[in-house]
Image: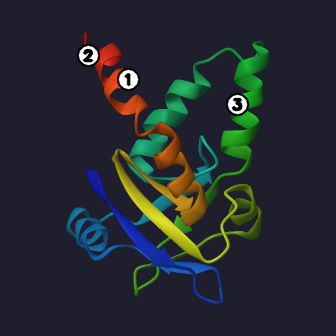
Amino acid sequence: MWYGEYTHTLDDKDRFVLPARFREKIKGLKLKKFFLTKGLERCLFLFSQDIWEKIEEKLKALPFTKKESRFFDRFYFGSAQEIEIDSQGRISIPTYLKEFAKIKKNIIIVGVADRIEIWAKEEWDNFCNTNQEKFEEIAENLFT
């Protein structure tokens, strides 16, 4: 559903404009509500409401008696913010999420099928440089 890599900059109110292709898709699908939360590898995850609810159901099915489940839920749900995209296609990033992802000004927005990831440009560059060579190896292991 979401694909591509886009470079953007935060404005002075910690907002960014979603890529035009994403805005068009949101408008076409009549999506209203999104959820922004801590992601993995120090990025942020942005989910549409329907995908968020599917993931929420799966996570709620995990036993809260398991330490790992409680731990993950605290970070994932505890840091989540319900987000509405303004009329100009902008999203505001709360300070605590910005700090978690080490975002200063320049960001990379990555469409990853069912979610959108938001990265500090430096962190994204580091992730890509560190992991590029692993891509083929991981693909081979996943698809054989």
Residue 45: give x, y in percent of width and height: 53, 51
Residue 49 image offset from top left, x and y in percent = 44, 52
Sequence-wise, the earlier of marks 1 and 3 is: 3
- Secondary structure, mark 1, is helix
What is the number of the mark on residue 74? none
Query: Residue 72 bears which disc, if any?
Result: 3
Q: Residue at x 29, y 58 (%)?
A: 4
Q: Which residue is mark 1?
A: 138
Residue under the point 31% across and 24% down: 139
Q: Sequence-wise, which precedes: disc 2 or disc 1?
A: 1
**Image point 53% across, 69% down: which residue?**
107
How dense is the environment of label 2, judged by Cα within 10 Å: few (below 14), some, or many (20 and up)? few
Residue 79: x and y, percent? 71, 51
Q: Which residue is mark 2?
A: 143
Could you tell me the amino acid type at mark 2?
Phe
Residue 61 falls left or right of residue 95? left
- Secondary structure at badge 2 equals loop
Query: Which label sits in the foreground, 2 or 3?
Result: 2
